[in-house]
Image (spheres, grey):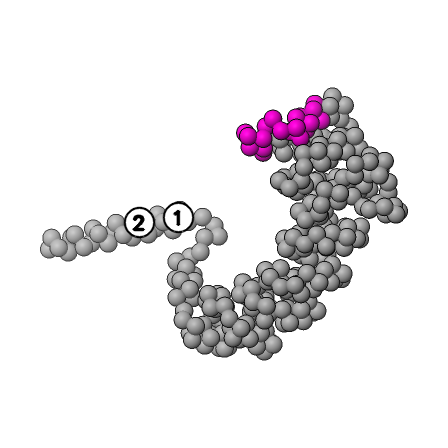
Amino acid sequence: MRRTTVIAAASAVLLAATAANAQRRPPGRTPPAQGAQNAQAQDMSLREAREAIQSSDVERIVDGLEAIVTYPSAEVVQLVVELIRRGNSDRVTDTAIETLGQLARPEAIDELSTLLRHRRVAARAEAVESLAKIQDPRVRGLIESALHDSAPEVRAAAAVALGTIGNRQSVTLLFRAFERGVPEAAAAIGRIGSADDAVSGDAAHDSEDPRRTSRRQTLSMWITHASISVLLSGFEQFLNRRDVPSAVKIKIIERLEQRAASAAVRDFLQRWVNARPASARNAPEVTRANLAIRQIQGGSR
């Protein structure tokens, strides 16, 4: 009798704890059943993952794709490529394209280059992102070609990817993309461009119309010709880089103060100053930013 009472009490405590955990679980958390499925996918052997991918059940295929990334090889790439070519739901196709990026094998490049012409925008954008994860000299040219895609989502993905892979040879194309309305190109230029791509030593140069100049474009040229909020995403990248000299950062701040004095610029500079580590609070560019903040506060428009 006593044993039965103890078991009943223990069961009640367990049920109460389970209910409390369910109540505390925030929206979006993986349910226990789904979590078990994910753990099962992670524990799959290569043979089991292959069998799952070759099945006709969507959930099994997705689980197999999640597991197969831990076995990167040319053979596995071919398995995923065959899955894509077999024809599947959009979910399976997109997951398979993402898997090719996670495998990061050069053997996937041919298929991903073909997928850049997929009928669906999401698939083309995913192909761009997957290409960017593969280290191979062919990748940059393929991603640059996506800057001409008809869909803004794909052009945006291409600009972000070019900023990620970090090749300065893409800067000229990124400026052209920015001129054609790809705002993400500004941040990409800020990530991979040289100091001369940010600002010229000649203020008159930076005052020219970038769409009509015969000289090298700078991001500063666009200050009065493009959205300042978009441009700030590029300037922030330049200002945060350790390989950009203080003198260049000071010129960027001066151009912003002289040609775009506004609450948006003031707030941007204030956030940037506040984010500096204590060791950089006395840096020349931080001192110049603080001066610009005071000047804009005194006469902002």
In the picture shown, does residue 164 fall above or below 142? above
Report the residue that reaches farthest toward the top: 298
Rendered residue at 71%/36% (across/down) = 248
Quadrant of residue 232 in the image?
top right
Q: Say what amino acid the circle numbered 2 marks.
A: Ala
Q: Magenta includes 286? A: yes
* The one of 236 and 116 positioned closer to us in this rendering: 236
Residue 211 on image: x %, y %? 86, 47
Q: Which residue is labeled 1 in the image?
A: 23
* The one of 101 and 34 positioned closer to us in this rendering: 101
Residues at circles 2 and 1 in contact by the CB criterion of under 8 Å? no
Residue 141 on image: x %, y %? 71, 63
Secondary structure type for disc 2: helix
Q: Is residue 179 left or right of residue 293?
A: right
Q: Main secondary structure of the magenta part?
A: helix
Q: Is residue 114 left or right of residue 70?
A: right
Rendered residue at 86%/42% (across/down) = 209
Secondary structure type for disc 1: helix
Q: Which of marks 2 and 1 is nearer the N terminus?
A: 2
Q: Give the range drawn in magenta.
A: 275-294
